[in-house]
Image (cartoon, grey):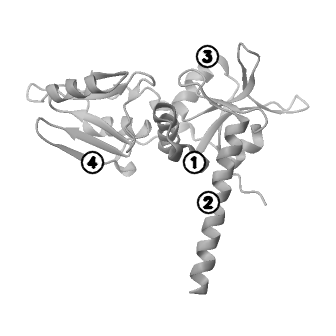
């Protein structure tokens, strides 16, 4: 029985691949606003609760910057809240924490209120949580995510469907994959003009390259999804399916 799923990604999203676009004119009355940026990924910082942080108080911003490793502050005073929320959601955030002098408020980010483009927030979140916090829960949830692989269809070749791969200095071969279209476009412009983005689920990803593994976001985070890690995540996936079956059977008996 085949559970995997494939879908070519909509090109509409690529028009907004730069995370730092969409500025608005600054007015003298607007208070300074700062966004906490993760220097490892060059994206808004994400804590284990999938929160990003927007500060309207400079002292609080500097205090948090000092407490967290490898972060910096960027001035987003000239950007409206919708732009900031879209940026954070694209990077994996579910909440935007607005921090003032004496209090803070966590705003849930609703996708329907954001800039219209392709988002893959879950995968971006779980990859980052796994890399920064070594989160076991994030590792398990990679089984529920969608991935983007680079595919070239060339009917002049015997094997006319070609998936992009990468080779490390140590000789390791792996297919390349991406967490979103911004990452894919950055790679395509440099290495893969002939390639198109194809969205697959986790079991589809395993079917394509489970023996070789995947290098996810090869130009930025370089997350290596090894064959061993793919097998481990697949076991989590199967265990969860079995648990759901048992729950359904239990509900039927009641």
> How would you rate the neighbour count of disc 1 (Cα within 10 Å): few for under 14, some for 14-19, many for 20 or more?
some
Which mark lies nearer to you, 3 or 2? 2
Question: In the rendered image of this protein, does residue 198 appear above or below residue 19?
Answer: below
The answer to whether marks 3 and 2 mark residues whose Cβ atoms lie closer than 8 Å is: no
Write down the residue under mark 1: 140
The answer to whether marks 2 and 1 mark residues whose Cβ atoms lie closer than 8 Å is: yes
Of 145 and 241, the residue lying toward us? 241
> How would you rate the neighbour count of disc 2 (Cα within 10 Å): few for under 14, some for 14-19, many for 20 or more?
few
Q: CA distance from mark 3 to mark 4?
A: 37 Å
Which quadrant holds the N terminus?
A: bottom right
Q: Residue at x 67, y 45 (%)?
A: 232
Write down the residue under mark 3: 190
| Element carrying mark 4 | strand
Write down the residue under mark 2: 240
- Farthest top residue? 169
Q: CA distance from mark 3 to mark 2?
A: 39 Å
Write down the residue under mark 4: 107
Percent x, y for residue 56?
16, 32
Q: Residue 251 is drawn in which quadrant?
A: bottom right
């Amino acid at each position: 029985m085949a559970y995997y799923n494939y879908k070519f990604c909509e090109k509409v999203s690529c028009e907004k691949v730069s995370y730092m676009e969409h500025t608005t004119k600054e007015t003298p009355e607007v208070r300074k606003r700062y966004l906490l940026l993760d220097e490892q990924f060059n994206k808004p910082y994400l804590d284990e609760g999938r929160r990003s942080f927007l500060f309207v108080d400079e002292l609080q911003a500097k205090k948090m910057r000092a407490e967290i490793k490898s972060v910096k502050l960027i001035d987003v005073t000239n950007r409206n809240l919708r732009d900031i929320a879209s940026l954070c959601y694209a990077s994996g955030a579910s909440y935007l924490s607005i921090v003032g002098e004496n209090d803070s408020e966590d705003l849930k980010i609703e996708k329907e209120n954001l800039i219209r483009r392709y988002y893959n927030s879950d995968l971006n979140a779980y990859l980052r949580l796994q890399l920064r916090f070594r989160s076991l829960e994030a590792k398990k949830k990679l089984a529920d995510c969608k991935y983007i692989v680079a595919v070239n269809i060339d009917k002049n070749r015997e094997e006319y469907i070609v998936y992009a791969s990468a080779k490390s200095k140590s000789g390791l071969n792996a297919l390349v994959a991406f967490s979103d279209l911004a990452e894919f476009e950055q790679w395509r412009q440099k290495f893969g003009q002939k390639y198109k983005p194809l969205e697959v689920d986790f079991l589809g990803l395993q079917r394509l390259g489970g023996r070789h593994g995947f290098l996810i976001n090869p130009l930025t985070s370089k997350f290596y999804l090894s064959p061993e890690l793919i097998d481990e995540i697949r076991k989590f996936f199967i265990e969860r399916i079995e648990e759901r079956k048992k729950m359904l059977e239990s509900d039927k008996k009641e």
